[in-house]
Amino acid sequence: MADVRGILTRRLDSAWKRGEPSALLADWAERIAALRAVSADVAEAAEGYAVGIAGADDAAAIQTVRNAALSRENGAFTEALALGPSLSVDEKRVLGKGLNLGKALIEAVEKAKREALERSKEDANALDVTLPGRRPFVGRPHVLAQVRDELLDLFHGLGFSVYTSPEVELDTYNFGKLNFAPDHPARDAHDTYFVNPDVVLRTHTSPGWVRAMEERKPPLRLVFPGRVYRAEAVDASHMDQFHQMDGLYVGKNVSMADLKATLNTFARAIYRRDVPTRIIPIYFPFVEPGVQMDVQCATCKGTGRYKDESGERRCPVCKGTKWVEVLGAGMVHPNVFRAVGYDPEEVTGFAFGMGLERITMGRHGIHEIRQFLENDTRFLSQF
């Protein structure tokens, strides 16, 4: 059986790092002795492959040695087994038993070595209780969430409750019942994201007014926070998705004086007691009369100019106007009341809607709205 020894040992590589199989298998000595008693040639080869596996530094090196010994295509033991038909019955019996014992021994060493490598990885990542402790990372609410929660707390103190409505809204609620004309520009596809001809991504949180008034009878005092979507060109002060908070107060004898008092309370609480503000007339389909509340631009401090490393230029937030619009408001239009089944001769009400991003920018002096969605912890950790 001289050919068997040559086939079994010719794939042994002297470049393999040598190890000690007995350190991996407690019964190594007994098993290799039993193999030698059956076939010295097979035992010699099996020991060579086991030494190579024991000395392997990683899983790839283990696999290289294993393939040389046991690969189904060209492994040494596979080739030796193919000699069976050319051997006598007794030689075939001896060879078969020896190859089976040798294969089992190599596989046992391989398994033990892989387990040892896994344990060493775990040990490397084990907790060293003697090292100084690390301060755990503590998260915080997003700056927009902080402002939203502060506004909710403010309006709760003024008697308002929270009402949530869907972000994917029917065209009827988003436009029709809010007194938008059929040909209003906001109903065009280049201004609004349409899911289908009758469903849109809401462009404001005002559809919540309609749903709330259809569900409840006056008096109502509600705020409507949430995300809204508009097909806008993105720049320093505009995004195609942002956050709004609407407010609605409906009852008997609600007047513009009530609206102004509410807005003044809001401005003093969110900005500062002496923040310059202005209220100017503006048109909204769902209120009459409509107004817009502006605050002095915090980025340029009301100068209209902004300085940075590149020099002085027109303020990117207020576009040089010195003012930033923070909300629109007005008295609820009688047509909106009629659309929800209220009698405009019996009740009146005011409404307002504000963008959380613009309020946050004005409060913290942020001049780039895109930073709110970039998830840059260097920016977010400042608040």
Image: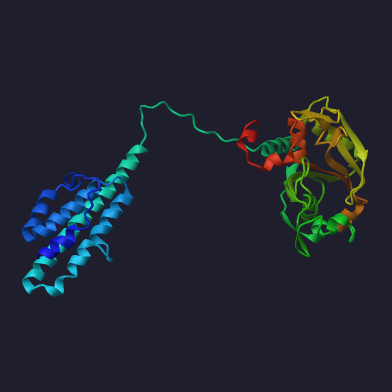
Tell me residue 225's x, y (percent): 73, 45
The N terminus lies in quadrant: bottom left
> Can you tell which quarter of the image residue 119 is in?
top left
Above or below 286: residue 150: above
- Residue 72 pos. (x, y %): 27, 65
Residue 87 in the image, given as x and y percentages of width and height: 10, 72
Asked whether residue 226 is in view, the answer is yes
Question: In this orientation, which residue lies closer to the viewer: 319 or 48?
Answer: 48
Relative side of 43 to 217, left or right: left
Q: Colour scheme in the image? A: rainbow
Q: Which sits in the foreground, 120 or 160?
A: 120
Q: What residue lies at 76% left-to-right and 44% top-to-bottom?
A: 244
Q: Position of residue 103 (x, y in %)?
A: 19, 60
Identify the residue shown where x is 71% and y is 36%.
147
Q: In this rendering, is residue 167 above or below 353? A: below
Quadrant of the rendered structure where residue 66 is?
bottom left
Examine the image and state in which quarter residue 102 appears: bottom left
Rendered-image quadrant of the C terminus: top right
